[in-house]
Amino acid sequence: MPMIQAKNLWKTYGDNVVLERLNINVNAGEFITMVGTSGCGKSTFLKMLLGMEVPSSGELLLDGKPIRTEPDQSRGIVFQQYSVFPHLSVLENVIIAREFEHSPLLGKLFGKQKRKVVDEAKALLESVGLSHALHRYPHELSGGMKQRLAIAQALIRQPRILLLDEPFGALDPGIRADMHQLILKLWQEHQLTVFMVTHDLSEGFYLGTRLWVFDKLRRDNQAPTAYGANITYDLPITKRSAEMPAELKKITQETNER
């Protein structure tokens, strides 16, 4: 059975149709990159995977069962804006999720349990290259370091699915390239299933094992919100390369002309 299934999935907000007739299967371990014009439903689909949004009709299934309507341990997310707590150190930012998991009322752990969580957090921070910054605060970190911290926050609860919403869009090219290598390493080491929204087609092709292009299959200029987007291209990527294939260049051209 596929890990994720969408069956005739629709998402609407009143008369505004965002997604329509979406049917997909995703197996565990795939790295799905999603591209398309702004407002075509990529982030909306990501939010439905997280449980922040619910389908208007149709089904979105995880292991054959409807996805829970609130975030849980199986799904972690990293946004473009750094979702870190400014009053906590790097180490504290990572362990807080585990503290609230084990102690929902106090948000604190003690003794052996605390030491175990701290050791887990330190190992994870080492894997994302932040072992030298355990006691720094977010205002003392660069943009790339903050995003590494956000990734560590998402992974500390050992999710099966990692959701990335344009996580590298605000980073400089050199830092972005380093983050690409990091996310590929973590994907393999943690055996994750990844869904990533990006506006950069070459990034989507380089990182993903499968690239989805979201676009509308039908349009009405008199009623621009009457129809929603679907996945117009579902491209398997069998070879990692920084070079964009001809088919993707054509899609880029079509997107830029709109």
Image (tube, rainbow, N blue to C red):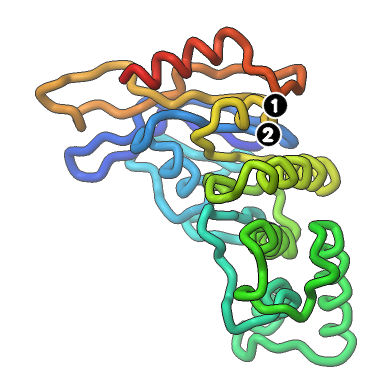
Q: Position of residue 48 (x, y in %)?
A: 46, 46
Could you tell me which residue is drawn at 81 percent across and 70 percent down?
A: 121
Q: Which mark is residue 31?
A: 2
Q: Position of residue 132 (x, y in %)?
A: 84, 70
Mark 2 → mark 1, Cα distance in angstroms: 5 Å
Residue denoted by label 1: 209
Of residue 138 and residue 44, the one placed in the foreground of this image is: 138
Q: Label 1 amino acid? A: Thr
Horizontal placement of 81 versus 128: left or right?
A: left
Residue 176 in view (yes/no)? yes
What residue is at 40 percent from the left and 48 percent from the top?
54
Secondary structure, mark 1, is loop
Q: Measured along the vertical axis of the image, is residue 150 above or below residue 122?
A: above
The quarter of the displayed image where residue 129 is located: bottom right
Q: Earlier in the sequence, mark 2 or mark 1?
A: 2
How many labels were placed on the picture?
2
Do residues under tags 2 and 1 come within 8 Å of each other at their CB atoms?
Answer: yes
